[in-house]
Amino acid sequence: MLIPASSTEYLHIPVTLPAGVDTGSIPVRVAVVAHRANPADTEWHTAAWDDTDVRILIGPGSDLTLTAGDYRVWINLDPPGAENVVRQSGILTVT
């Protein structure tokens, strides 16, 4: 995805879940980082479900104000049970 640094908008991240899974019962967080390592605990932000996508507000006036550069977008799903899923979900370029 490509956005200008001056834009405040929702970043949508598509998620494929097994049939019958209620997204309302799964907490979700997003990290948008400029490094290649796994995100630190302080880099995660609470996100929200939008049907089967996850969304988070980015840009000026949000919790995620980004300068020009390339960022790795990570998602963290915490479904019931022992799993705590962390995945890199794409690259965001800010101009």
Image (cartoon, grey):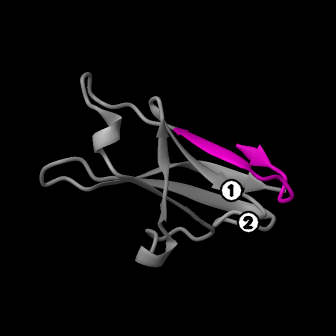
Q: Distance between the residues labelled 2 and 1?
A: 8 Å
Pointer 2 local density, CA inside 10 Å: few below 14, some 14–19, many at least 20: many
Q: Place residue 40 in its image quadrant.
A: bottom left
Of tags 2 and 1, the one toward the viewer is 1
Task: State the extent of the magenta-drawn residues as a range.
Answer: 1-13
Could you say where residue 22 lies in the image, as x and y percent from the top left? 29, 32
- Residue 12 colored magenta? yes
Amino acid identity at mark 1: Ile
| Residue 48 in the figure: left or right of residue 58 | left
- The residue shown at (34%, 39%) is 24
Please, what secondary structure does the residue beneath circle 2 have?
A: loop
Residue carrying label 1: 58
**Residue 26 magenta-drawn?**
no
Marks 2 & 1, CB-CB < 8 Å contact? yes
- The residue pinned by badge 2 equals 66
Q: Where is residue 82 in the image (x, y as percent from the top left)?
A: 13, 55
Q: Quadrant of the N terminus?
A: top right
Quarter holding the C terminus is bottom right
Q: Residues within 10 Å of mark 1 (few under 14, many from 20)?
A: some
Please give left or right for residue 71 compared with residue 87 in the image: right
Residue that appears at 44% across and 30% down: 52
Disc 1 element: strand
Q: Depth check: 55 or 15 in front?
A: 55
